[in-house]
Amino acid sequence: MMVKKMMMTTMMVAGVFVALIGMASCGSKSNNDAAEQIVETTEVEQVQPMPQVHRAAFLPTENTPDFVDAAEASVNAVVHIKTTIVRKTTTYNDFFGAFLEHLYGIPGQTQNNTMVAYGSGVVLSPDGYIVTNNHVVEGADAVEVTFNNKVIREATIVGTDPTSDLALIKVEGGDLDYLVFGDSDKVKVGEWVLAVGNPFNLTSTVTAGIVSAKARDISILGEGSNVESFIQTDAAVNRGNSGGALVNTRGELIGINAAIASHTGSYEGYSFAIPSNIVRKVVDDLLMYGETQRAYIGVNPKEMNAQLAEKAGMKDIKGVYVAGVTPNGAAEKAGIKQGDVLTRINGNEVNTVTQLLESVRQYRPGDEVMIQVVRNGHSENYKVRLLNETGSTDMVKRGESFYNGTFGLVLQPISQQDMKALGINGGLRIVEIRQGAFQGAGVEGFIITSVAGKAVSSKTDLENALAGNRSRKTYIEGLYPNGMRMTFEYYN
């Protein structure tokens, strides 16, 4: 079974067919049949009594869920997102057309391939903050948001978190309809939910289903993902629903629709949403720090089985086995040991590795959590202060951008997350092109890793590299976010 993300693009045309099936009975009579037929009988005719018809009552009972209020609260807060992505060809002249024209007067012949993609988003505040999937806006050159009342506004990307497939965008406005967060930890399997979005560009579509499973890992985000823990539902979700809302019958946001599992690429009964508690934490991180904050317990978790339960002195197979602890990590500092079984975090049960990771993902470095463990058949509680990846409680902030007059560029140090994803040790991202040779060269978003043979990761690094270069020719090396590496020459 293949798992597909649900972003809908104009490169794939989906046809929706509605078949109207009717039944008709017809008969014909000949002229001979017009005459009344007389049947002579010699026996007493047996008359069959008319069958009794029992009418079914279709009036809703008191326990029937009512989706009307939840739907009305949701449709105006879920928006249609259109992204435009301009992809340049990778040939030298195409890439450096405007650059060469500026330096040498050589006309550039740049051919653009424009791709348009569609998805959904959820308004989180009256002043225009909108959450969606990262794969909806990733690499976008322009983002356009259409509201349910057909108002169209341009949006800017505030921040993204590819490891959770979430992004935060912003439109100008006030007094917008928005959704409030529900507690995804309290969502129950079998609970009624609504999926709201724009499948196949059918705007403001609402479908209903139940929660089929929780803490589902479908291995769609790749090895760079910090955690995959989806809410699985059978509410109909298709291409274009990406970034839309999963709400409960009270109209609270309990998830962001992200993926479907399908053999055909269309809905087959399995859809997946990112839990709202993770969404809320990522959105807050992007607003406050510009980067998502990762917290770690510092254990090597393992799924429980009968042998491990017996080894831990437990009658029931539950919890998560601690196969090892990180030296000087949060768990070891709190007293948790190899061979312990983690059963609860802040009162919430954890019975799978995915549940454990989902619970931890909701916290930041420095937060304290109460962890219940079973050791030698006895239950114990430990207060654990979570740490970041480097073993401290420091928050990681996005580097401040700065302007370099030599290149005419506004640059920004890339994040630890980007370094890890791209396999590099540092770099400066081009966030704005103001003047000079780079105008029109299509290098916005390009990450400069070295200048004149020297690695650059800060304003000071770049200034020192330029100051130490005594040649008029400067080699600039780097790569695009998609991993394509480029090296070119700059003449000053």
Image (spheres, helix red, strand yellow):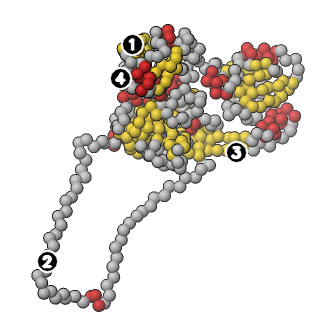
Which residue position holds label 2? 46
Q: Are marks 1 and 4 in contact (CB under 8 Å)?
A: no
Residue 100 - label: none
Which residue is depicted at the point 46% across and 9% down? 335
Find the distance from the CA under tag 1 to the CA under tag 4.
Answer: 19 Å
Find the distance from the CA under tag 4 to the CA under tag 3.
Answer: 62 Å
Element on which disc 4 rests: loop
Q: Are marks 3 and 1 in contact (CB under 8 Å)?
A: no
- Residue farthest to the left? 44
Element on which disc 3 rests: strand
Which residue is depicted at the point 27% across and 43% down? 64
* Label 1 neighbour load within 10 Å: few <14, some 14-19, many 20+: some
Of marks 4 and 2, which one's residue comes earlier in the chain? 2
Where residue 63 appears, x then y in whole percent? 25, 41
Horizontal placement of 61 versus 105: left or right?
Answer: left
Which residue position holds label 3? 113
Of marks 4 and 3, which one's residue comes earlier in the chain? 3
